[in-house]
Image (cartoon, rainbow, N blue to C red):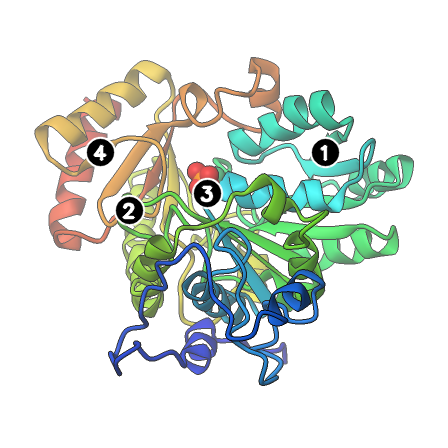
Amino acid sequence: MTLQHDPMVAMANARHEFGEHGGVNLSIEASTTFTVLAAQTMPQIFQGEHGPFSVDAGSDTGGCYLYGRHFNPTVFAFGRLLAAMERTEAAYATASGMGAIAATLMQLCDAGGRIVASHTIYGGTFALLKEFLPKKTGVETTFVSISDFTAVESALQETNAKALYIESIANPTLEIADIPKLAAIAHRHGAILVVDNTFSPMLLTPTMHGADIVVHSATKFISGGSDIIAGVVCASRNFISEMMDLHTGALMLLGPTMDPKVAHELTLRLPHLGLRMREHGRRALEFARRLANMDVEVVYPGLTNHPQHALCERLFNEGYGFGGILTIDLVDASRANAFMEMLQNEHSFGFMAVSLGYFETLMSCSGSSTSSELSEEERRAAGVRPGLVRMSVGVTGSLGQRWRQLEEAVRRVLFA
Ligand SMILES: *Cc1c(COP(=O)(O)O)cnc(C)c1O
């Protein structure tokens, strides 16, 4: 019997804020600076005697805030919910997913440090690791296929890497990371396992399987509205404190802090994140099954023919499904484009746009969009085929209505 974690239950337990006047929603602490009652408290805050975690530690020195970039109570309240969801001691919310990822990796690696990363990762993260970090900091990354455990192991061994960086569900291949195995390999070589869990909040809790740090682009499912750019780092209290250090902290000094108004907004969307994930997953599974029945090449982790379906069953939390993302191979770019144009312009089925996790369906041709930072060879190695359409299945309209639209587009583009 594996350990159980229900992120909705954990978040409900962590939700203990009231609004300032007894409001049912927490208040927005829209202040960039904070006062103290005794002048002597100020130097104590600077010396770290009163810190962001004194509230959590139950000490009566809570309320010792310093400056908004360092610590804002509303941002922290949001972080506490994310920490509960990801089963970490603490979390720090950032202005973007890239802000969370870059700050985490820069905190982990000193100049000249080494990282081993999956070769199928978000384009922005890939560019950060391949171009930006080596040029600016001398931190070099070795890219490997994370399903090749021998390659992961020897890369970690050869480079003495500080971190193994993976995504729980790879984009756009939808390959599932074997987190327990990868955690064991990373730990054997003294590396920290960092998992980008953007595709599967609620569905999968990487720390349940050995991950050390979880990062998110909250821009996607966590927001659900395609209206906010945001991110989060979920980690130990120690690591988050390190990131907030006044002299050496990447969050404090690079400044990718989340705005408290954004934190407040997102806090109101977390209570229905579980419901949304379930509905995204229910529809995506139904589409995937029906497309497979039409002999369309569809990849979805919930299909029993997905190469790692059994692994999914083993790792995923119960009751949240297999996620809202599927891919359809439409053979070539011109058919992929015709398919997306038809669905958007004739059926209002969804939008041709990058990103994911929106309540409407989003479609993009990965090879010419989100994976375009990769060279042609890198795309081939990562299994990104030219006609591959990634679909983030929305929750508007009815399943029947959306299926009729999708089915017609598939028939016209592939079977006409
Ligand atoms: C979008 C995305 C990011 C980057 O997040 P931003 O919020 O756009 O900065 C990182 N990782 C994954 C998997 C993403 O989908």
| Observer able to see residue 326 | yes
Q: CA distance from mark 1 to mark 2?
A: 30 Å
Residue 227, quarter of the rendered image: top left
Label of residue 96 in the image: 3
Amino acid type shown at disc 1: Val
Query: Between disc 1 and disc 3, whose residue precedes?
Result: 3
Do callouts 2 and 4 mark residues in contact (Cβ within 8 Å)?
yes
Q: What is the CA distance from the residue labelled 3 to the residue labelled 4?
A: 22 Å
- Residue 368 location (% of width, % of height): 41, 19
Can residue 170 be seen?
A: no
Q: Are marks 1 and 4 in contact (CB under 8 Å)?
A: no
Mark 3 lies on a secondary structure that is: loop
Q: Earlier in the sequence, mark 2 or mark 4?
A: 4
Identify the residue at horizontal 45%, vertical 45% (top origin): 95
Q: Which residue is mark 4?
A: 351
In front of the other: 139 or 335:
139
Residue 72 lies, with reference to residue 8, above or below; the image says above
Residue at coordinates 49% horizontally, 25% vertically from top-left? 371
Please indicate whether residue 324 sits to the left or right of residue 309 in the image.
left
What amino acid is found at the position of numbered circle 4 in the picture?
A: Phe
The three-letter code of the residue at mark 3 reads Ser
Q: Which residue is mark 1?
A: 144
User: For mark 2, what is the residue?
Assistant: 358
Label 3 beta carbon less than 8 Å to ligand 1: yes
Q: Report the side of 66 relative to 141 (left or right).
A: left
Disc 2 crowd rating (10 Å Cα; few below 14, some 14-19, many 20+) is many
